[in-house]
Amino acid sequence: MAAFRWCFAVVLAVALCSGAASQAQVHRRQAAVKPPPTAPGQTPEKSPEMRIAAVVNDEVISIFDLVSRMRMVMLSSNIADTAEMRQRIGTQVLHSLIDEKLELQEAKKQNVVATDSEVNTGLQQIEKQNNMKSGQLNEYLKARGIDRAALVDQLTAGIVWAKLVRRQAAQTTDVTDEEVDEALKRVKEHAREPQSRVAEIFLAVDNPSQDGEVRALAERLTQQMRQGARFSAVAQQFSKSATAAVGGDIGWLRPDELPPELGKAVSALRPGELSAPVRVAGGYYLMLVVDRRNGSSATEQDTVFDIVQVVFPLPAKPSETVRQAAIGEAASVRSAAKDCPSLLKIGKEKAPQLSSEGQLRASSISPELRTLVNRLAIGQVSEPIVQKNGVGVIMVCAKSASGGSEVTREAVTESLLRQRLDTVSRRYLRDLRRNAYVDVRV
């Protein structure tokens, strides 16, 4: 039931998101760098989108680059595209572009590349996730005024940065068998205690002068998510934690496993609730409690459903007429579908953008939706489900036990490694910023 989704599977394959990108300390100096060339007969005054937004060492980020990325961020996160919101996120998006530029420059220096195959895999994942045919993504971006290069650059920076950090970490970081044994022991000792499924967004504050700006962004993102923006997509685009690569998902844990300020915030939330910005050393956190469980119910909550869903999208502020029309469309689909293949076929014909088939883990969805899906018999279509960004129906094709309640040694090792990589990534990028010449022009 989501808006258009960007998939960062290529980055996830190496278990590290790009951009533990904080807002940089920027030298506001003039640089003798020429703007990008204009088309014949044009002047810079007639092409404001080609003005320089920032200079990073000897490379330029244009206003066009910034605008394309902001459009992409708002589309993928389902954030309202308003002048006020563009102003709110502009600085943060520009600093992310600056950090990506530094990452790409470092990769070139170290002879680290993202292959065409890796980038194409990322683009194909996006098309697959959104039920698009091969090449349809290009048309989708063009129709919405988004430069395809903005997405390719983001994917490329994520791939090469993951490789660079892995290389750096290999020289200094290792997860020992003893550490994994100790972590597994703690998991087993507390397996029967109540846990929360928690997701996070971290917005960094590099120096006190940025505090007000970052807090204002945190508050605005919170407001947007409460109005329908997807937490996982906002985390992918804005969070400066390694969990950004997995939509901010930390996993199941007890509140006392978090820092005190975050643990207190999580304890006060109900499933599905989002915290107000929480100030900690280094920045602000937004915490989401996805679900809660007792240890005894973990197996039930790890049931996996094979589903087909058909979703008719709604605008950010739909009129009652538009809303009722979407409900009517969903109801007509419900009446026509006899089984999963027929529902999927109807969905691809009537609502191809958001209709899909796949697996849904019970523990990853809200308690209300889990209750609804649990009550459906195999082959039964749900009543129309109304959410902020769409109206749809779900059919359960099969149910199975995932066996996911048993924490594996591999999962624990990966979690510990991701924490180490996050530290290495932040330190590496901090050093690149310190040694860089950056001139922000907007």
Image (tube, grey):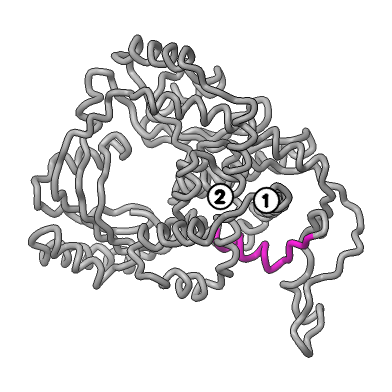
Query: Residue at position x 22%, y 63% from top?
Result: 330
Query: Residue at position x 79%, y 55% from top?
Result: 56
Residue furthest to the bottom: 41
User: Which amino acid type is marked by label 1?
Assistant: Asn
Could you tell me how many numbered marks the image carries?
A: 2
Query: Start and end of the magenta stretch?
Result: 59-72
- Residue 256's disc number: none
Query: Does 70 lie within the magenta span?
Result: yes
Q: Are marks 2 and 1 in contact (CB under 8 Å)?
A: no
Q: Position of residue 369 (x, y in %)?
A: 25, 42
Q: Nearer the viewer, mark 2 or mark 1?
A: 1
Query: Residue at position x 16%, y 53% from top?
Result: 395
Q: Quadrant of the C terminus?
A: bottom right
Which secondary structure dominates the residues rendered in magenta? helix
Q: Position of residue 198 (x, y in %)?
A: 43, 30
Query: Residue at position x 80%, y 58% from top?
Result: 55
Q: Position of residue 410 (x, y in %)?
A: 39, 27
Q: Name the residue that disc number 2 marks.
A: 159
User: Which amino acid type is marked by label 2?
Assistant: Ile
Note whether 158 is above or below 152 in the view shown.
Answer: above
- Asked whether 348 or 151 is in front, the reply is 151
| Nearest to N terminus: mark 2 or mark 1 | 1
- Asked whether 261 or 43 is in front, the reply is 43
Between the C-alphas of marks 2 and 1, the distance is: 13 Å
**Where is residue 344, by image quadrant?**
bottom left
Note whether 296 is above or below 61 in the view shown.
Answer: above
Element at label 2 = helix
- Residue 111's disc number: 1
